[in-house]
Image (cartoon, coloured by chain):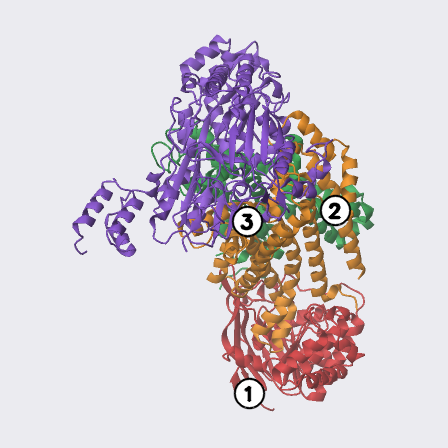
Amino acid sequence: MRYLAGRTVYMLIILAISSVAVFYAIRLSGGDATAARLPASATEADRETLREVLGLNDPIYQQYFTYMGRLLSGDLGNSLTNNALISKMVIEHGRNSIILGAAAFLLVFLVGVPLGMLASVRRNTFTDQGIMSLSVAGMAVPNFWLALLSIWLFASVLGWLPSAGCCEPKQLILPAIVLAAEGTALTVRMTRSAMLENLDSDWVRTLRAGGLSEARVIGKHVFRNALIPIISLAGLRIGQIVGYALIVEVIFGWPGLGQVLVNAVLRRDYPVAQFFSLVLVVMVVLGNWFADLGYLAANPRLRKI
Amino acid sequence: MASPLLSVRDLTTVIRTEGIEFEVVRGVSFDMYPNEILGLVGESGCGKTMTALSVMGLIPAPAARIAGGTVLFGDRDLVSLSERDMREVRGDDISMIFQDPLTSLDPMFRIGHLLTEVIRRHRPVSRSQAEAMALQALAEVELPDPETRMSQYPHQLSGGMRQRVMIAMALMLDPDILIADEPTTALDVTVQAQILDRLLGQQRRRGMSMLLITHDLGVVAAVADRVAVMYSGEIVEQAPVTQLFSDPQHPYTQGLLRAVPQTRHQRGALHTIPGRVPPPQFVPPGCPFSPRCSQALARCWEEHPDLVPENGRRLRCFNPQPLTPA
Amino acid sequence: MKENSPEIQSILEEYQQRKLSRRQFLKKVGAAGVGATAAAALLASCGSDEPAATTAAPATTAAPATTAAPATTAAPATTAAPETAMGPSRGGTLREGYNRDVSKHDPITTNWYDPAFFAIYEAIVTVSPDGDFVPQYCTDFSVSGDGLEYRFTVEDRQSHSGNAITAADVAEFYRIQKFSFIASLASPISHYEVDGNQVVAKMNNAWVGTLGPLATGYWRIANINTWKDVGGYDDETGLAGESVVASVYGTEVVDATGPFKHTEWVPGSHSYVERWDDYPGSNVPYFENKGTAHLDAIRWTVITEAGQRATQLENGDIDTLLNPAHQDLARLQENPDLTVYQHAEWSGYFMFMNREHFPELFGDVETRRGLSHAVDREGMAQALLFGNGAATYGPFPTTDRYYDPAVEQHNNYDVAEANRLLDAAGWSMGSDGVRERDGVPLQFEFMVENESLQTAIATAAAAQFSQVGAQADVNVVDRAVWFERAGGPEVPAGLFMWLWPIPIDVLTLFCASYTVPSPNWSHANEPRIDQAIADWQSAGTEEAAAKAQSDFQLAWAETLPNMSFINQNSTFVKNNRVHGWSPHVWLLYPYYNDTWIEA
Amino acid sequence: MTASTPESYLSEWDRRLLEFEESRHISVFRRGMRNLVRNRLLLSGVILGLLVVGAGVLGPVIAGGDYELINFSNIHAAPFSEDALLGTDHLGRDTATRLFVAIRVSLAVAVGVTGLALVAGLAIGTVAGFRGGWTDRSLSGVMDFIWGFPLILVAVLFAGGLGEGLLSVILAVGLVNMAAIARVVRGEVLSLSEREFIEAARAGGLSNWRIIRKHLLPNILAPALVLASYYVAVAIIAEAALSFIGLGAQPPLPSLGQMVAEGRNFLQLNHWETTVPGLALVAMVLSVSLIGDGLRDVFDPRLRHEAKGLES
């Protein structure tokens, strides 16, 4: 429990630092925020007036406290580009991101873990080599390229799936697979090696000496042990998926947090960029936190009774 | 003498590494009788454990396989038994205790679960009946506070307690044969005697046949009825325990005995056997012990001696010499 | 195949000789008593070389300046619609693909407007396919003889919220609109007054351009009372006030008089409007459907990935599409299920050259002209736009009614002339292939926004500059960075793309001396240009307007305040199941009053 | 029968035994070479890597040509057409010429990023793991934080501060990879610190620096190198991804991600503009991954069975 409390405090500290870092990161990257709002025909005087109203001429630390003050009072503000309410955008785009992320996350583990188990059980056979070659290839193919190729093949050439858009199930297929590809490949390897490590352990021999079937030894005991590294990998996966989602969402026109964040950063739409990147950091940190929890729950050696 | 419970004949096990096959157990034969302890001794890497695992059908496939020989258990040849039938035998008719109790229990499950799972595998009993059996088995090996232990994880138990759990697991289904692979090596000296004591008590009480694998000649001398000495995958000498210790014939057996620290001879350097056990990939062509043997003849380097029976003893040596005091 | 009757046979021949369009063919055989299925079989028998439907919508070619109305022929989709016996059917959702993000649906504070404005809002007047101004919100309008007063008759209307809009509300809307960042495009309009049920625009001077801006998206009439309620307007801070900056008008709330109601709006994704069942009807004379809309709803999907727009139309994920990628156009034109409309777009790409901070580079006109002659604009239009656009030697796109082809004698592709001018300007070729003058190399940063076509244009231009010894280092930056740096002391040159249905209004902003440093990022200060702008804004007659615009174009082409490159066509594609969707050249987007989808 | 004496026989046997043993415990280098030959995937990784490096280093020299040169009359050409071996792009620029330069750019970035990340990551991870306490907690906190930060934000920050371009990409990716390497190194150091020989060294009163230099680093170096090979692959992909969204190499200087990005609008017209640089990217990453697996096979026997599945 102390471990858990420690992780929670740690998470909160990370979040606090993140809010500062994100704020400074986006401000320091330059760019005229008023360009997002004003048409090209706006004069310098127009721009200056807007900067004044938006508080962009204040010192950054002051802007930070103003911003955090509003944030903590529940006022997320609205987009500089188009006045959209950030609270509404987060719900709308967050939902889409969660759908895509969850689909990819499930794919990673529902495909990766069984394949990794299969490879480990069929160690050094053709099946194993086939799966592992695929996994090496899966890790070598950059997801943005995979995205383009899959759109080209499945949408343009074959016409089987929609190339982009949101949020019907068939529109989810390609982006989810692309987003999951690398993680799946990594999970296959991870699962296989965790399974093998445990398959070679002494206690497997004990179980076999007790007359237990291979299915039971592998499916229950070895798998349960292999699950520990897989669970801690899951936390990292969440972070990776959140990161990769930025590009995948843009290519597939999937209106998620990542797409909005990229656009907001490029346009220096500060309120949106700040809040959305905070949301992403929270997702990553929470992901790790949940993985810690899962790790704790799955590993009796860490439990105190 | 009664007919043997288990009869091993010409058992040969090979391992494949980096594309090359080599024998780790080479034509091993021995019999096991009820209510008897057979000691199997030898240096590390001489094939003792492999022999035991071959009998259990637990050699690590596909890297290893049994290349020949038979293991007759009653009228069944365990070598040619299907994996499914073999599973019925394992843990029920023949069980095994392993060397390292610290790593030999699945860390993710409670003790009770591990025990009942094996019981329910072999006996059509309910969960609570199985738990009662497990509890009794734990009590029989005198594990303190067995109820609590049942709900604990292996990492919460000491090494000695874990070995008792292993013993309970091996004995709870009343096997005919128990294979104990260095059951005390990994334990503290004070615990070793206790564990051995429990094990022996159980063996005598149940009238089991037990294969005790060890490199500790003191233990063998104390508990075994017969002793087989293995070197480089082969049995080089086998005799009743008193005969072997009083009159060892094989130079290797003699070397082993001389290497045991004698409390009587406190002074003087310990005796050692020069050289090392040859790796199984690289066994000398003649007698495998010849490179380390002080009394080797030219013939020993060229020819492989057979295991020759001779008044209750079996010996594999061209040039046996009486034991000379160190 | 059974023998066709002689009558059918002759129609078939006409069709094969391409005297008839596919549509006309179907109409004729239908009249001859052939059923739809049989007609389709006939068509199929004509072989694969059937004329593509797109022949009905030829690309607009450069219109001679003398013709007042351009020779553009938008597809006669509205007239063709009734050819089917069934007539317009009610219902359905039109799914339209759009190449930009959806804008905030507020005409006053948005920085661009998207097609939803044409469904949600009405402007006081609009433009007919012939290029004439016709009533839309007003029932009638007139200009006083001296050109100093425009009168628009407006009836009291209800808006989507059910609240009334009176003439006074319209005038108030215009009053506030004058504070918007785009209002200077109508600067000769002094103010608005109310006279009974008439809104009166009072002019500073007679100006023939008055109605132009009023027909665009920024002057589309919102219910100003609602606008003030949800956002408000502060007389002190104008449109940059905090209340306006945080306004939810155009995002959460929209209140106007168009046939569709703003329903859902998710930037980066889509916007969605539903039919307004209380729509009182349209005053636009060329609309066939004067009543409520046929469609239940319209959904605009943002498809920013250029390569995906055409695919989605081809796969049936959308029904209509604004601006497919140029490279996909040929394929779309070959698709018999689709109809393609192409007009010269009211847009163009130009390079600003910062004279104020880099006089050693761009201070003299010889250098600017030398660089300009190095650019193969025709080649650019062919390669980058796949011919779906045109070279621009002056500021205007070639379709504009005031386009003066005299600009074409300037800035033509002539490497020898380029070298000659640069030599004459004193730039001597350095050993590394870069020219030098007084120790200054002819080398400069060329800033471009992070967008694929703009980057390609800048890269192509830079590569051509290097042929005559000028090195332009392309620097791709975010839009925000572009605007932060443009016109500033660090950036010698940058590429900009403008889009506005009345070129003269917006182009003057980029070179007038009073818009330095933004958006006149070149810091151009040319008396000739200023004069032409002044002439245009006080042009009370068609002749004066034409003269002023010619002067402006020639002055731009000769003095090069900015260097124009190319302008692209705006392209519209629809699935043939969609009828009454007829974009025309004079407006950026189509209207949806007449649009219906075959069930 | 031979007449050799037992003694000579024994020494002869010992010699042969010793040789045999040596053959099993040969130097890491020789074992690596043996594995290289035996492990076909590792071998193909090395060959592929040599090809890629060759293309990047020698390609531009041999192929020559001006990667900026545009040609409006020969755009979107397919490979093997006219005089364009790998075709041309949307401006009529020669794909082969640009590809070689792009590979060189990718290699330079990968080397820069990994060098930076490895040196800094080793230093920070070692100090954190060795010192423990508050040093560890604060350093690990910072590393965790950097590592969890979305890369694109880091990249945009650097792009803003230093201008868009390769330097920003190298620093951004290097920083994130450094954090990742530091985390792993710290873990290794922590587990090593509990081992007897380090305890013994501490008990023996050796200076910290000496312990680190003599005992920790040699033991960490191998896993760190294996890790670094993995992060070379990460760096290549990250650079490509950032260039893909326009934060990397500035035109006309080509990079693989940028070439893929430029080609993506023309997939149906001439997919080679996307597939060729994409394949080059895959080849680079694949070679690095295969070499990384092979290295781990050599250096990290604990994980040998993982790579074994790929052995034939």
Q: Are marks 3 and 2 in contact (CB under 8 Å)?
A: no
Q: Is residue D110 above or below residue C93?
A: above
Residue beneath disc 3:
C273
Q: Is residue B134 above or below residue A62?
A: below
Amino acid at pointer 2: Asp
Q: Is residue C572 above or below residue D199?
A: above
Q: D232 or C99, which lies in front?
A: C99
Rendered shade, chain C = purple
Q: Is residue C320 left or right of residue B105?
A: left
Q: Dot 2, how many residues are within 10 Å of its Cα: few (below 14), some (14-19), or many (20+)?
A: some
Q: CA distance from mark 2 to mark 1?
A: 83 Å
Q: Name the front one of labels 3 and 2.
A: 3
Q: Is residue D288 above or below residue A202?
A: above
Disc 3 element:
strand
Q: A9 or C354, which lies in front?
A: C354
| Letter of the chain in red | B
Residue beneath disc 2:
A75
Residue beneath disc 1:
B74
Disc 2 element:
loop
Disc 1 element:
loop
